[in-house]
Amino acid sequence: MIVGMDGEFNLNKWNDRDSILNQRVCKIESKNENITNNNYLFHLLIPLFKKIESETSGSTVKHLSAKAINNISIPIPPLPIQQEIVRILDTFTDLDAELQAELEARKKQYEHYRNQLLNFEGKEVEWKTLGEVGKVCMCKRVMKHETNSSGEIPFYKIGTFGNEANAYISRELYDEYKKKFSFPSKGDILISASGTIGRRVIYDDKPAYFQDSNIIWLSLTNNMLLNKYLYYIYETIEWPVEGGTIKRLYNDNFKKIKIPIPPLSEQERIVTILDKFEALLNKDLPAEIAARCKQYEYYREKLLTFEPPVS
């Protein structure tokens, strides 16, 4: 097994004996496998290195020395016990690997069906520009001095859009701007128009505010388009971006984008199929993987906790 000695001290299995290791990567293996099982060492050392990393102080980049590794004391039960511990814990890691593989396979399956369902080439379907089916909207500009690092109403900037907010505005400012200016309705599809273009968030009607011009949405002006259908269509668009280091999607370019608009019944069918895939990819399988990881950690702690010898 190998462990990186700079930054994060991640432990990984390593079987490629023909490769050359970097000088800041340490290889750990048993001197005598009749005494210490290598896979037992692997399961044992994972939490130890995480603990060492959390306790290592110093500069921005943490460093681990070979001396520190050599000084780690570990329990060594009889080999049959080590082998049984490995058998039990490998069952969980093997299951995790299977679930990860299934997740990757499902992602490819989702992309296949999405591309197939949203490909209307050669079909009789109406095409309209985004500007013809809706109005491009954004929130009122919030100045830096109006934000705080904590508070009641999350303020999402382009860097935190789709993740956790790190800025907040007051309830008073939120109520005022929501009443006076453009604000998304529940179900509207917010997208990033700067940096990584086209990141999508479905507005869930919870109190939140969004950075002007960098985060936009299309407020539909007729009943010919479903927001959730638009959500999936956005994923297939090649965005007409401009700019140098920081890319931008300008409103005029956004409004000119043409999309296929099948009958509402067909939109609903497409959404139903893709929703099932998305639930599997973003909820069901990740939840199953997280549960198996917790189960592994629980049994690893139980199996690898030994009473210290009585002196």
Image: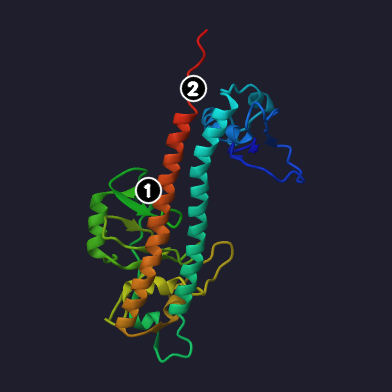
Residue at (68, 33) in percent of width and height = 29
For the N terminus, give its image quadrant.
top right
Q: Amino acid at mark 2?
A: Phe
Looking at the image, can residue 258 be seen?
yes
Residue at (57, 33) in percent of width and height = 83
Label ID, residue 156 = none
The residue nearer to you, when weighing 201 against 281, is 281
Residue at (73, 41) in percent of width and height = 22
- Is residue 230 depicted above or below 6 in this figure? below
Residue at (33, 62) in percent of width and height = 140
- Identify the residue position indicated by label 2 in the image: 306
What count of labels does the image hold? 2
Residue reaching furthest to the top? 311
Question: Image quadrant of residue 278?
Answer: bottom left
Residue 285, percent across and down?
42, 55
Dot 2 falls on a residue whose secondary structure is: loop
- Identify the residue position indicated by label 1 in the image: 167
Residue 273, percent across and down?
37, 72
Dot 2 crowding, Cα within 10 Å, few <14, some 14–19, many 20+: few
Dot 1 falls on a residue whose secondary structure is: loop
